[in-house]
Amino acid sequence: MKVLVDVHDKRWNKFKIDFDEIANAVVGKKYENSEVSVILTNDKEIQQINKQYRNIDKPTNVLSFELGDDILLGDIFISIDTVQREANLEKITVVEHTAHMLVHGVLHLLGYDHIKDDEAEIMEEKETKILKKLGIKNPYAIDDEWQCDSAECCPWGGVVAWIKKLKIKENGVWQYFLYALFGGVASFGFAPFYCWWLAVLGIGGAYWLTVKQKQKCGFWRAWLRVSPFGAVYAISMFWWTLHSIYVVPELANQFAVWTIPGVIGLGIAGAFIFVWPFVVISCVRRNPAYSAILFAAVWVLVLWGREWMFTGFPWNPIANISLNFPMLANSMSLWGALGLTFVIVGGIATIVEVMRKPKSKVVWWGLLVFVLLGAVGMLWGRYNMQLATVGESNNHKLIRIVQPALNQAQKATHSREQAIINAEDNMRVLFELASVDERPDLIVFPETSYPFTVLKGDIMPLSQALGTDVIVGANFLDNGKVYNAMLFADRYGQINHIYSKSHLVPFGEYSPLGILPSPVNLSAGQGAELVNVNDLLVAPAICYEIIFSDSVIPDGKKTPSAIVNITNDNWFGNTPGTYQHLDMVRRYAIESGVPVVRANYSGISAFVLSDGNVLSQLMIGDSGVLDGFVWGAHNTPYRMLGMNFWMIVILVFSGLCLFVLQRRD
């Protein structure tokens, strides 16, 4: 085949490239009488052509224009600027990359394409075989030779040398096993284990497995590869939700059949939710720092989506692995769990990239970005910790938390006769616990601890008997609808306010879609409120309402003295979920700058300061009371600006970084 070369940019002249040999390696004897035109140009010209003929206003490495003739095959444009940039990125010569572009372009003229996954796979395989004949390595396989693989080279060299010995095959059994293993390992970064290094290892290991594969990858192929990570990660983190099935014997008999489907459902949900960051970097081919920032941005976008998806469940943001590091954790007062998750996940990804390519300057710049963000966050975190101490020495109202710690069978039963007996016994327990020692200014009882359904106009006998203001959880019946409510009653038994839970638990408090299993179907309340009880301004939150950002304190309202969170974790017992629920409360206290009074039926009840520090607590299964005070309520940048604002900031910041990095190495 005859190759006609037209040089439009003189920079091409310094490269000795045998275009005839390369093109003829593609076509073979079938097209020995054909002709192809190769135009060696630059970004400016190829961008103009791209805009004119493809309506894409940006340069590309190669463009092919097929003429549909067996003799005159068509024209191929190759840009020196893009080819040089990509060659530097991939650590190959311009001659090698130009050869690849020409092979790619000629195959387009012969009818090959890469729009669909199966077509791309065929075309890439064809290119790889042709380039191999020309003595050029596979351009789609990332060089698995780490630049540092000995202890003499760098501190992590020995680890790299061990990793290289694994010889993990793409789409092989061990690859899927490792993805699953890393997903399980990552879940141990949260309470009650607090093995933050395992979360770093799990996320970093899965990121490494992803970026070591082919740079180009179709969506479904990438999803299938990474899905074991998401599935096992979700099951490892959320298996405890199924513990609730077995707490009450009557419910266990009815719902035990849903255990296996529940586990499978958790895995399927995780495989579709937690894999997005890995899938995106599998499908986008860029430099290492670009991949790391993109990975962190998508991870945070998924976390933000979990606030709303299927009524929302933003449990265990990666930011929570920092809660044992107060200055770092308190950076959430600046930019919330979204911002801190961005910093941590981005830091993990860039560390992996530094280990892979320590000689790449752009990778170190990427790491510096996350280090600086972490430092800024910690400085603000330190300031937030100081604000949390304001007013500590002032006189405060004494608050008593009551934790009865009765088991769920004692708390509620489906037998009418036994229910009456239990209700009377439970009232006696609540009164005896609450009436010890001096009388406090306010007594807080847990979620649904009052064993009778309340109607409008009812009197609260507990507050009458105790002679003090109380906050107590109960079922509230109004106009034929039942609500999970928080009652505010004064010392005379008058119920002055009723707050109804607005964010109900799917499968527990209502039936999703009206067909999926749920033991009850409650009605939802109106949302966030502020309530004045005995001259103490509080924001009520029932159960897991407190895990949702911006959900408890109304916008534009005065800062409350405390958040009162009543809950019943009896359903989850001594499982990780109970400890993690407390950490979600600590996170909210930091983000909002407001201390939390938390009354849990079986534990963990606690006084949590506005810097996330647990001042005092009653552990799981302990029956008793906890007396304490609240102070240090203040506004925070995160609460003032809101979760959605910070999501936009993170996306804009990431976008600017990616814009700069796409043209740099």
Image (tube, rainbow, N blue to C red):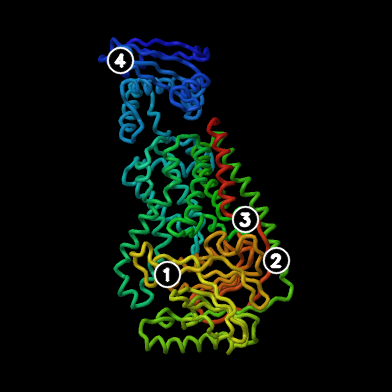
Q: Secondary structure at mark 1?
A: loop
Determine whether the residue tagged by mark 4 lies in a helix, strand or loop. loop
User: From the viewer's perspective, is 535 left or right of 304?
Assistant: right
**As shown in the figure, which amino acid type bears the numbered disc 2?**
Thr
Which label number is shown at residue 285?
none
Q: Quadrant of residue 167?
A: top left
Which residue is disc 1 drawn over?
Answer: 509
Query: Where residue 475 sits: x, y (%)?
Result: 47, 77
Q: Nearer the viewer, residue 360 or 321?
A: 321
Mark 4, residue position: 69
**Disc ID at residue 389:** 2
Q: Disc 1 or 2, which lies upstream in sequence? A: 2
Q: Work out whether residue 330 or residue 493 is closer to the camera in this orientation and state it.
A: 493
Which of 392/112 is in front?
A: 112
Q: Residue at x 47, y 38 (%)?
A: 149
Mark in front: 3 vs 2: 3
Considering only order in the chain, which callout, 4 or 1, is on the residue closer to the N terminus? Answer: 4
- Closest to the camera, between mark 4 and mark 2, is 4
Q: Is residue 317 above or below residue 648?
A: below
Quote the CA–CA distance across marks 1 and 2. Answer: 38 Å
Residue 436 can be seen in this image: no
Residue 567 visible in the picture = yes
Label 1, label 4: how far apart the Cα atoms are: 68 Å
Q: Position of residue 74 (x, y in %)?
A: 36, 16
Mark whose residue sits in front, 1 or 2: 1
Front tag of 1 and 3: 1
Q: Tell me the residue that label 3 is attached to.
A: 638
> In the image, 270: left or right of 382?
left
Q: Nearer the viewer, residue 322 or 518?
A: 518
